[in-house]
Image (cartoon, rainbow, N blue to C red):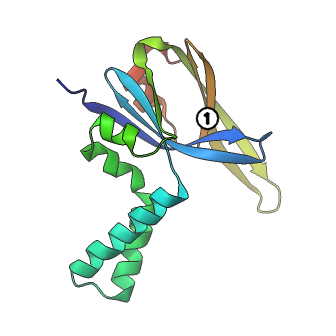
Amino acid sequence: MESQIISIIPNMKKSKMLGLSEDTFTLVATSDITIFAKVTNKLMKKIVQESRDQAKAEGKGFFGQWGAQIKGSFNYAERYAGMNPQEILMESPENFSVPNGNISSVTLKKKTRRDREEHTSLIFWIVTITYSSGTMKFTTDADPRDHLQRIYGTRVK
């Protein structure tokens, strides 16, 4: 029996090159494994093109196609709900998985960053996943606590 997807968390950013740039991943969890699907430029172009083509096939004009492209680029992670885990892993050579049994803890820290120019505060979360081969650290704009607890239960701190 194939593992069913139990949660999808988009926009997980992993810092690289001394924090000067970052890679974006979508965390896709099943009851057995956690897949880290890298969001690549090639993937985003494909999603935008598919959204535009679908809108065109539905008879939508320029603005309808444009709106579909924007919606597609924001909702890219939803497509994983209709895929099996093996398809997701095969989508890109940069996608990888970790068995859930190898994940010992997931730590969440809520942070606030102030924008002095606009006088606003930006809230984000730091997600640290500790597993048998090391640690991965991500940041995300949306509170992932409910999703992570659904996947890892009491291992979420």
Q: Examine the rendering and report whether any part of residue 70 can be seen.
A: yes
Image coords of residue 33 (percent x, y): 38, 23
Q: Which residue is mark 1?
A: 138
Say left or right for 82 vs 144. Answer: left
Q: Quadrant of residue 89?
A: top left
Q: Quadrant of the N terminus?
A: top left
Q: Residue at x 45, y 62 (%)?
A: 73
Q: Quadrant of residue 85?
A: top left
Identity, as a three-letter code, of the amino acid under mark 1: Phe
Most distant residue in the bottom direction: 61
Q: Is residue 1 above or below residue 115?
A: above
Q: Quadrant of the C terminus?
A: top right
Most distant residue in the left direction: 1
Q: Examine the rendering and report whether any part of residue 141 can be seen.
A: no
Q: Residue at x 41, y 31 (%)?
A: 147
Image coords of residue 150 (percent x, y): 36, 25
Image coords of residue 21 (percent x, y): 72, 48
Say left or right for 2 vs 135. Answer: left
Q: Nearer the viewer, residue 101 or 67?
A: 101
Per the image, label 1 sits on a secondary structure element best described as: strand
Alpha-carbon neighbours of circle 1 within 10 Å: few (<14), some, or many (≥20)?
Answer: some
Q: Nearer the viewer, residue 3 or 129?
A: 3
Q: Is residue 89 above or below residue 105?
A: below
Q: Is residue 57 above or below residue 2?
A: below
Q: Residue at x 21, y 27 (%)?
A: 2
Q: Residue at x 31, y 35 (%)?
A: 86
Say left or right for 64 vs 92. Answer: left
Image coords of residue 28 (percent x, y): 40, 35
Q: Nearer the viewer, residue 61 or 112?
A: 61
